[in-house]
Image: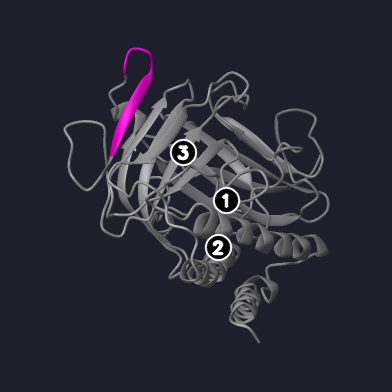
Amino acid sequence: MSEYSEIWTQFCHDLDQAGQSIINSDLAGSDLDQAEGLRYLTRLLRIGLNMNLEHADPAFPSFYQASHSTAKIGSDNPDNFYQNATISGDYSYKITGHRGSVPILSFGTKANRYAIDGTMASTGEIDIRDVSLKTDGSFEIHVGPEKQSKNWLPTAQDSSILIVRQTFFNRAKETPACVSIECLDGPETPNLLSADKIVLALKTVPAFVGGTATTFRNWATLFRKDNRNTLNTVDQSMFFKAGGDPMIFYLHGWWELADGESLIIQTHIPECEGWNFQINNVWMESLDYRHHQIHTNNALAKLNEDGSVTLTVSAKRPQSGNWIDTAGHSRGTMLWRWTGAKEHPIPQVRLVKAE
């Protein structure tokens, strides 16, 4: 057996082992759940290859999407446009861009340890509201360990990923920000792909797949046990350890409906930058928001006369109100986000017979 054959065989073996946390999980209660579990593994593989092979050089970073409509991690936000870039604490960078009109725009550097222990520690954060813009809406942000007087996104020695989050309330009426990134003190040209680099990538990708799958399988299992048909995860420490946005207060839960049942969710709305609610499958992937109304937010939902909001999660559209479509599913996880809120009310959730 040649060296290349051994490398490939080991990669396939490691990938097989990485998938066992999903394949052997008891979260799947239907054929649909099982099929989505296998698809989930292929999606994590795609993300892992982009992250650790195609966009892996921190000296020549470029933005890619780790979460989007067909690749999803950890209750991905349907209202978000996520952009990721590989960076290193050894280098300094410059982000240039144009503000656009997207309501929420934030930048964060992280120590990505999903392949090691399922965590993603924050090493620096900056919100567009804290960035000095030019008159035409353009901006520059310095990224690195040396403190700057303005427009500075810090890094640490173990910083390895930069995440841009653009949050929309009504995509049809809002303009995305345009951003690009360049390394300021790296080599002039990238090194060619080497055997050592491909070996490292093919070792890291299965570790990423297994670490990510295991982390969010454990979350979903916990929510099923402790938060069934409730939204009351007030302890935020677990979510921030996994790379959560510090502007957001996360209320996770597990939803499960028998035939003819619905969930009625109601809450008052505090002062905040925005809010949204979504439902996911058992693997914590948002359901298919391209073709189903599986989420809503502060701009899309119709409020009650007293300023509160009521949502109905059901298989069939109710006669009135804000409908969240289960899209052929009967169980999964769910998430309410309060963004920039002064307080964090816990929504009331009631299980009822459907209309």
- Of tags 3 and 1, the one toward the viewer is 3
Element under disc 2:
helix
Q: Are marks 2 and 3 in contact (CB under 8 Å)?
A: no
Could you tell whether 190 is left or right of 10 in the image? left
In the rendered image, residue 186 lying in the magenta stretch gets the answer no
Q: Residue furthest top?
A: 135
Residue pointed to by mark 3: 165
Most foreground residue, 300 or 268: 300
Q: Position of residue 334 (x, y in %)?
A: 60, 50
Rendered image quadrant of residue 317: top right
Q: Estimate how packed mark 2 is, as few (under 14), some (14 to 19) or many (20 or more) residues with alpha carbons within 10 Å.
A: many
Q: Which residue is mark 1?
A: 75
Amino acid marked by disc 1: Ser
Viewer-proximal residue among 292 and 180? 180
Which residue is denoted by mark 2 in the rendering?
Answer: 216
Q: Quadrant of residue 271?
A: top left
Q: Which residues are magenta?
A: 134-142
Marks 2 and 3, the one that precedes in the sequence? 3
